[in-house]
Image (cartoon, helix red, strand yellow):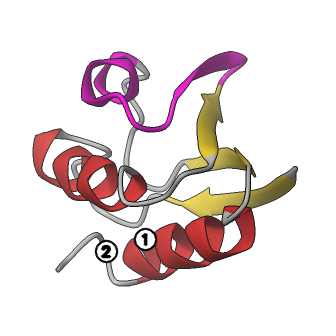
Amino acid sequence: MERLTIAVNVPLGFHARPVSRWVSLAQTFQSHITVTFRDKTVDGKSALGLMALAVPGGAELEVCASGPDEKEALAALASLASRSFSA
């Protein structure tokens, strides 16, 4: 299992558009991905779960991936976040 802390660098937080882009990318990997914020952990491939976290802008998420492409998954998700979730 690999872990990474990822900053949500969008002023409005982890709202519908960044969550949609995150889920679209996360679903391309075989690994199981979880996201933790304020002691709540959700499936990193679930838009509803991620939206339920209500992550504000500037917050940090702990992302874990476990599976055959875990390193690639975390690297891709970190890259997406570093681009403020733009395609």
Instruction: Based on the picture, tell me whether residue 39 belongs to the magenta stretch.
Output: yes
Find residue 85 and report its horizontal and vertical position in percent.
28, 69
Q: Residue 81's quadrant in the figure?
A: bottom left
Distance in Å between CA atoms under marks 2 and 1: 5 Å
Find residue 84 and report its horizontal and vertical position in percent.
31, 74
- Of residue 82 and residue 29, the one placed in the foreground of this image is 29
Q: Which residue is mark 2?
A: 84
**Mark number, residue 26:** none
Q: What's the magenta region? A: 38-52
User: How many discs appear?
Assistant: 2
Q: Give the SS element for disc 1.
A: helix
For the point 66% across and 66% down, which residue is it?
A: 69
Categorize mark 1 by other alpha carbons within 10 Å: few (<14), some (14-19), many (20+): some
Q: Are marks 2 and 1 in contact (CB under 8 Å)?
A: yes
Find residue 80 and report its horizontal and vertical position in percent.
38, 75
Left or right position of 4 against 60 = right
Q: Give the SS element for disc 2.
A: loop
Q: Which residue is mark 1?
A: 81
Find residue 5 and report its horizontal and vertical position in percent.
72, 58
For the point 60% across and 42% down, which residue is it?
A: 33
